[in-house]
Image (cartoon, helix red, strand yellow):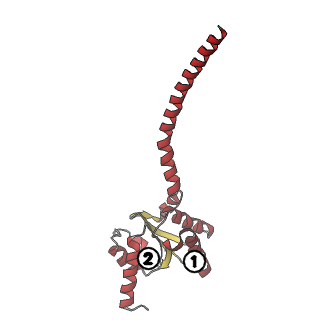
Amino acid sequence: MLRRPQKEQLVAELTEELQNASLVLFSDFKGLSVAQMTKLRRALREKFGDNARLTVVKNTLLKIALKNANYDIEGHDSSFFGPTAVLYVKAGDPVEAIKVYYNFVKENKGTPVCKGLFLERSFFGAEQLEDLSKLPSREQLLAMVVGGIQAPIRGLVNSLSGVLRSVLYALNAIKEQKEKQ
């Protein structure tokens, strides 16, 4: 049982971690063995190193830490019931963490159950987890943007080179005619 000073220290540490988090996911971990929880933590560590963490937190302490970190938790009380594990990502692509979590849930036949999440401080319900897991990664999005910007430029270059090619063919034809004469 934690005493008040320990709880205050835990809330302060959690608040500091959550202030810089791009993803905060709440999960019910009932039905998971220690080995399964370790496997999920290991998968997150492989992808993010020390920038992602999965920890079990008491709901009241979690609410206080979220409020202190300026998260809008009003109306989302359904996410804070029963045993709660919190997955948060401090650096890296938060969508990748959602994919790791979602794949783990699929692999374990629906366990653990997502209660809700904050992605870039916007709340999403548990039912939106699958849709979020299908989003392209940050690198893929950047590639799509660069491709979109590059396409018109490439078209212009091809058009201009086509005009130059036509002029070249015309000059070549004139040269051949003069050589025949």
Residue 46 sits above or below residue 165 on the image: below
Looking at the image, can residue 130 be seen? Answer: yes
**Element at label 2:** loop
Q: Specify the quadrant of the image occupied by residue 165.
A: top right
Which quarter shows the C terminus?
top right
**Element at label 1:** helix
Q: Which residue is mark 2?
A: 81
Residue 52 sits above or below residue 176 on the image: below
Q: Give coordinates of residue 142: x percent, y percent.
A: 49, 52
Q: Which residue is mark 1?
A: 37
Q: Give coordinates of residue 121: x percent, y percent.
A: 38, 65
Q: Amino acid at mark 2?
A: Phe
The label nearer to you, 2 versus 1, is 1
- Tag 1 or tag 2, which sits nearer the N-term? 1
Label 2 and label 1: CA atoms lie apart by 19 Å
Q: At 44% across and 64% down in the image, what residue appears?
A: 125
Q: Give coordinates of residue 170: x percent, y percent.
A: 57, 18
Q: Amino acid at mark 1?
A: Met
Residue 33 sits above or below residue 146 on the image: below
Q: Nearer the viewer, residue 123 or 172?
A: 172
Looking at the image, can residue 111 be seen? Answer: no
Q: Alpha-carbon neighbours of circle 1 within 10 Å: few (<14), some, or many (≥20)?
A: some
